[in-house]
Image (tube, rainbow, N blue to C red):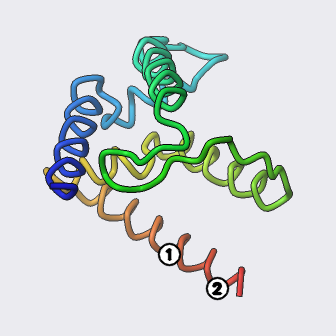
Amino acid sequence: MQIVIAFACGVVFALGLGVSQMTVPSVVIGFLDFFGEWQPALLFVMGPAVGVYLVAWHLRRGRCSPCGATLPATAAHRLDARLFVGASIFGVGWAIAGVCPGPALVNLARPNTFTLGFLAAMLAGVGLSHAVRR
């Protein structure tokens, strides 16, 4: 049953990304272009999503999730160089490509060379991260 719930959550997430056009790199880049022709539409997608997550996390913290994992009772507050470097690399990559891992996986439903190239680069980055940590 946990697999069915996890799959259903993934489908809902993928549909939300598609409907909100977060799978379209030009839309995402337009949202990140604060000093050019800023397109604030994704603010109305991400803002409520953060709000829903905060309420759900508050209600479920310290308990088992529907998928079986225990949600932490408190947020991790380990702010170190590794976190800031990783977040910076992720943010710059998101701004350049206009896509992050979730939408890239959704875009596999209709793969193109951009999506396949992005996923190859993402997997290479994950591999490099693991190699550097060792």
Horizontal side of 5 relative to 24 (left or right) equals left
Residue 100: image x %, image y %?
45, 47
Residue 97: image x %, image y %?
48, 46
For the point 49% across and 21% down, which residue is it?
A: 55
Return the residue nearer the eye: 17 or 111. Answer: 17
Horizontal side of 46 relative to 4 (left or right) equals right
Q: Which mark is residue 72?
A: none
- Determine the secondary structure under disc 1: helix
Label 1 environment density (alpha carbons within 10 Å; few <14, some 14–19, many ≥20): few
Residue type pointed to by label 2 = Ala
Return the residue nearer the eye: 51 or 110. Answer: 51
Q: State which quarter of the image contains the C terminus.
A: bottom right
In space, the residues marked 1 and 2 are separated at their CA atoms by 10 Å
Residue 72 vertical placement versus 33 (above, below): below
Judging by the rendered image, the residue that carries numbered circle 1 is 124
For the point 39% across and 31% down, which residue is it?
A: 26
Determine the image quadrant of residue 58. Answer: top right
Determine the image quadrant of residue 83. Answer: bottom right
Residue 94: image x %, image y %?
53, 44
Judging by the rendered image, the residue that carries numbered circle 2 is 131
Residue 3 vertical placement versus 97 (above, below): below
- Determine the secondary structure under disc 2: helix
Determine the image quadrant of residue 120. Answer: bottom left
For the point 18% across and 51% down, which residue is it?
A: 7
Horizontal side of 52 relative to 133 (left or right) equals left
Residue type pointed to by label 1 = Ala
